Image (cartoon, rainbow, N blue to C red):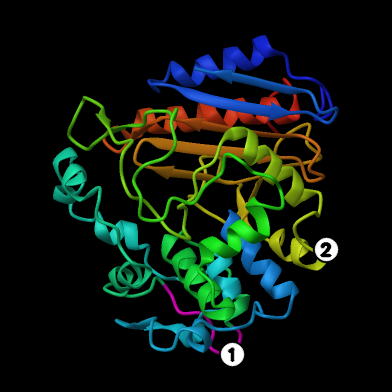
Amino acid sequence: MGAGGGYARSRLQRDADAVRDTGATGLTVFTRDAAGRETQARSGFTAVAVLQLVAEGTLSLDDTVEQWLPGVVAGNGNDGSRITLRNLLQHTSGLANYTDVAFEDPAELTPERFHAQRFRPQTPEEQVAVAMQRAPGWLADADDPGAETQWAYSNTNYVLLGMIIGKATGNPWSQEVHDRIIEPLGLRHTLIPGISPYVPMPTAAGYTQFPGRDDLTDTTLAVGGGADGGIISTTRDMNTFLRALMAGRLLPPEQLQHMRTTVPAPGYATDGRTRYGLGLAWRPAEGCGGGIWYHGGTSFGTASETAVTPDGRVSAAAAVFTTRFGDEKRFLEQAEAAERLLDRAVCGDRKRG
């Protein structure tokens, strides 16, 4: 059964139950096939906005961080003049991940610290300043920084992109994402909460297992993220976004091709074969023309995953409402089960290639 075939509700439910059986408190998954049939079971916007601005001539992928944010990326060997927008989008900047620095001390990753800080937002400037406490993993060639292929995921990259969107347009990144993507696509259940920890009800409860603990902590209520992931959506809206993106409704062909130009991304996924483009990842998957495009995200209490065929005709999105910082083995089992679920939902009921 290829990507164009249906994916039976019973099969979807069994795969969803397999994710639940790894210890997840719950999940939701939504798929849409090439004929428009929808199946549901329960048990990257920033990059697009940047590439639209590139298509309009407001930004260039060769622009450096220093050009738009003078002096912001500096100190401890960091150099904004050797990091382009392409590096930020592709995670080839070498910049430290501010979240890794913030939670480097195990004492910072506890239920008590979470509850004490969950209503305290950080400005983008503060987040970047945290990353600047660490030396970069590498510095790109000063003559051609955009050609860098060393890769490491860093939320700092997208925080900087949000700041650059603001500088280039005069509007907050959230307004540009809303006006350019959310409203035109009619994503009525997608929102950018900003500094508010509250979201409209009903909403799923997210649970986190902290290091050194066996119990789960309700981490639903918290301020979280900015241009690096501060968007709340539904699996249905994510399917709409993915299909529009791959079908060329959001980006001109040149910018979509830039998005699909990849470098090896060691450590991003468990299969070791993932490649990363500009805000979008690719992995091989049998039955989907050689591979699928996807992106995931993890926060306190939620792990999201998506998948879409290269032509945008078939897509799936899932959200699992349990994260385990205290049990890496079970966290990986959950991630692998979610990956299998999406591969079969998008590519058909056969083993991955």
Q: Amino acid at mark 2?
A: Pro
| Dominant secondary structure, magenta | loop
Frontmost residue, 44 versus 344? 44
Circle 1 residue: 143
| Above/below status of 183 relative to 326 | below
Q: Position of residue 119 (x, y in %)?
A: 25, 50
Q: Residue at horizontal 82%, vertical 27%? A: 2
| Above/below status of 9 relative to 296 | above
Distance, label 2 to label 1, CA atoms, is: 28 Å
Q: Pick the quarter of the image with the N terminus.
A: top right
Is 143 covered by the magenta stretch? yes
| Span shown in magenta | 138-144
Circle 2 residue: 253
Q: Amino acid at mark 1?
A: Asp
* Labels 2 & 1 near each other (Cβ < 8 A): no
Q: Does residue 284 show up?
A: no
